[in-house]
């Protein structure tokens, strides 16, 4: 595991859409809060230039919907919520991810074998 939250870019490209979908499914939220949640989970810093295209793609796929809201003493924010289709996709993709990770893991040497 990366102690500093920096993961190979190809791992992040693969995992980020599913992780973002999971964060939004847990609660209605906005982009900066999604980035904070990803960071708190140990995925490192996800910049806006990476995160917002993922949010937009998920919305274009019909998995998320968004709405602008006035900010309390600040600028408005675009809030995201998961759609019914998004909840179904999250369940399917999560199951597939776990199966994939398990199968890939069987090919890798164990930590004990590396010592």
Image (tube, grey):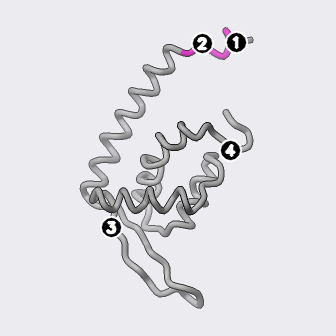
Give percent across and percent down for residue 9: 58, 41
Marks 4 and 2, Cα distance to the nearest angstrom? 22 Å
* Residue 54 highlighted magenta (yes or no): no
Marks 4 and 3, Cα distance to the nearest angstrom? 29 Å
Does label 4 or label 2 sit earlier along the sequence? 4
Marks 1 and 4, Cα distance to the nearest angstrom? 22 Å
Residue picked out by circle 2: 109
Q: Which mark is residue 72?
A: none
Measured along the vertical axis of the image, is residue 20 above or below residue 65? above
Give percent across and percent down for residue 64: 34, 62
Marks 3 and 2, Cα distance to the nearest angstrom? 42 Å
For image coordinates 25% across by 55% down, the residue present is 85
Does label 4 or label 3 sit earlier along the sequence? 4
For image coordinates 29% across by 61% down, the residue present is 83
Point out the residue furthest to the top here.
113
The region drawn magenta spans 108-114
Q: Are marks 1 and 3 in contact (CB under 8 Å)?
A: no
Residue picked out by circle 4: 5
Q: Does 81 sit left or right of 109 as displayed?
A: left
Label 1 crowding class (10 Å Cα cut-off): few <14, some 14-19, many 20+? few
Does label 1 or label 4 sit earlier along the sequence? 4
Element marked by disc 3:
strand
């Amino acid at each position: 595991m990366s102690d500093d939250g920096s993961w190979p870019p190809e791992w992040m490209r693969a995992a980020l859409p599913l992780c973002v979908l999971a964060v939004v499914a847990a609660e209605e939220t906005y982009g900066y809060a999604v980035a904070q949640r990803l960071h708190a989970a140990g995925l490192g810093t996800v910049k806006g230039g990476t995160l917002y295209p993922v949010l937009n793609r998920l919305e274009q796929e019909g998995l998320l919907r968004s709405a602008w809201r006035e900010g309390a003493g600040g600028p408005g924010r675009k809030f995201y919520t998961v759609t019914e289709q998004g909840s179904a996709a999250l369940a399917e993709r999560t199951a597939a991810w776990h199966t994939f990770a398990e199968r890939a893991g069987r090919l890798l040497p164990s930590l004990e074998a590396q010592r």
